[in-house]
Image: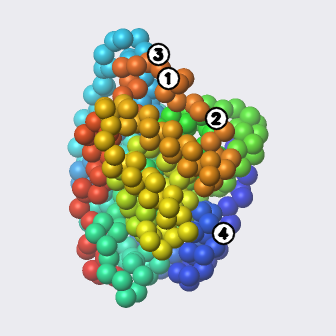
Amino acid sequence: MKCLDNVERIPAPSREVLFERYVRPGRPVILTDLFDGQPVRALESVEAARALLGPEPVKLSERQLVAAMRALDAASSGTPSVEPTPPACPTVGDYLDLLGAEPRTPWVMNELPTPASLRARIQLPDLLAPPPGHPAPEGYLRSFAHLHNAGSATDLHFDSDGRQVFMLQVFGRKRYILFPPSAGPKLHPVANYGTALLARFPEEEKLAFLRFAGAWDCVLEPGETLLMPAFVWHHVEYLDLSLSVNFRIADHGGMARYLLRHLHWDVHSQNVTRALLYEEPGRSRHDALFQELRRACEARYASPLERYRHMRTLLRDVASRLCPGTVDTDYFLSTLGPMAPWVPQLYRVYAGAPSTAALTEALPPDSGWLEAA
Ligand SMILES: [Fe+2]
């Protein structure tokens, strides 16, 4: 496996340096020592994970893109989508047994709210706590554990909750391929998924594509923590059976908080919200533009589809003004039109269903950690 290996590695810097050099400009970085000296670093093997986490309840899921593509196939062929039944694995120990028996199983432990037994081995670094003197906003931090088998992958997407993510690699190695939001048109995006299936690219072609689209590419080693800035595209390959824990931080300004709750997600809303991520209404040179978006969000429309069409057109226009170069190609609805039964999923946020962000915000906050920090 070849890798561009072009993500900077540094010891954990000050909060100010991290924000100005990496978080604000949207540049990923690997922090080499953020969790050094903590008990979690002693979890070096599958056996150690089993001893600690074996009895923890687990919910398995399929790779997201596999499920999405099955729904698309079903919609385009006019047949109902048949959801497979996950294997009976009520605990982490059962799942590890399954991985031993079926190393290539498509079922993964993705986004398990980090169990208390694992949290007890982690003291939240100051860098991940709210800024000193500021009370933690509701839902500031969320944390999830990921356990995948070697050969598994998380397909290309961006997280529509707009959080920056610190990913601690506990054991095993993972390859992270990241793209800036501006690379979206090159990734053939549908909603917040890139349909460029990097897991199936031959290695040389993959490297050529990564250079073409301006990727960051690295292998995260045990003990390292990768900062993925908000709204970066990411594709993950599991080189070993591995466990990681993420820390998802919502530090958006007021403009992004509003947009996260009111927009559908595609490459245009991604780029617009990323550009306004730390801006405050009434105190930004982009205020007129934000108010234009706000009026459109709060206007009345004949139908959810009409609202979607209007917002899509407006966001494309705003993106062309705010971040030129991100809207060169229009890949969706127009190209997916024949698959009409599935297409409404793309604008379901306007049909009364909660948005992804709203669903995420409904989860309990990690108040225990914040109080301890
Ligand atoms: Fe993600």
Pointer 1: what residue? Answer: 336
Callout 2: SS: loop
Disc 2/disc 3 C-alpha distance (Å): 19 Å
Foreground residue among 238 and 301: 301
Callout 4: SS: strand
Q: Are marks 1 and 3 in contact (CB under 8 Å)?
A: yes
> How many numbered circles does the render carry?
4
Pointer 2: what residue? Answer: 329
Q: Quarter-wise, where is residue 119 in the image?
A: bottom left
Please name which of the two marks, 3 or 4, marks the residue nearer to the observer.
Answer: 3
The residue shown at (60%, 80%) is: 17
Does the rendering let one see residue 169? no
The residue shown at (49%, 68%) is: 279
Disc 4/disc 2 C-alpha distance (Å): 34 Å
Apparent side of residue 102 relative to residue 233 in the rendered image (left or right): left
Is 209 rendered above or below residue 14? above
The residue shown at (39%, 78%) is: 130
Crowding near the residue tagged with mark 1, few <14, some 14–19, many ≥20 C-alpha atoms within 10 Å: some
